[in-house]
Image (spheres, rainbow, N blue to C red):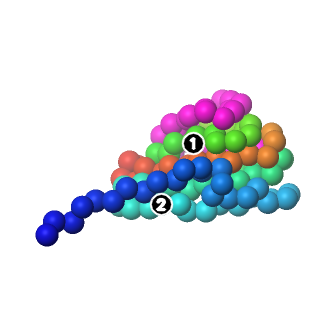
Amino acid sequence: MEDTPSATVFGDLAAEVEIPPNGTLSRVLYKDDHIRLVVFAFDSGQELTSHTAAVAAIVEVIRGRLRVGLGDDEVELAPGSWVHMPADLRHSVMAIEPSVMLLTMLKGSG
């Protein structure tokens, strides 16, 4: 009998985390040999300071508004926004209001 691949479904990504008062929370939702899916919840004013990653990544805003530094540029993102970041790009994230963000790390893309 052949193994049938199974799907992974999240009906409401924002419901996967609660935004902590005065804090930031991250939770790995899925990982395999190719991707790692992490949901972040930020209270207003919380941030991830400037850093780089060894793999390419995609940021999607699920709820709220974020100010994202991308190299020397800065953009404001709202729900529905999507950003691809190549490996080694310096970036930062700051929540303008309580926010939920989905980060997809693309393994093997560094």
Residue 14 is left or right of residue 33, and the answer is right
**Residue 18 visible from this viewpoint:** yes
Give the amino acid type for the residue marked by disc 1 in the picture: Val
Q: Position of residue 23 (x, y in %)?
A: 80, 59
**Magenta range:** 71-95
Question: How far apart are the two marked residues, 2 and 1, measured between alpha carbons?
Answer: 15 Å
Q: Decide: marks 2, 1 in contact (CB < 8 A)?
A: no
Rendered image quadrant of residue 27: bottom right
Residue at 24% over, 61% down: 4
Circle 1 SS class: strand
Which residue is disc 1 drawn over?
Answer: 59
Label 1 Cα crowd, 10 Å radius (few <14 / some 14-19 / many 20+)? some
Give the amino acid type for the residue marked by disc 2 in the picture: Tyr
Which residue is disc 2 drawn over?
Answer: 30
Q: Position of residue 94 (x, y in %)?
A: 75, 44
Rendered image quadrant of residue 83: top right
Residue 30 is left or right of residue 64, and the answer is left
- Of labels 2 and 1, earlier in sequence is 2
Return the mark for residue 4: none
Circle 2 SS class: strand
Residue at 61% over, 32% down: 81
Residue 96 is left or right of residue 84, and the answer is right
Residue 84 in the magenta stretch? The answer is yes
Residue 79 in the magenta stretch? The answer is yes
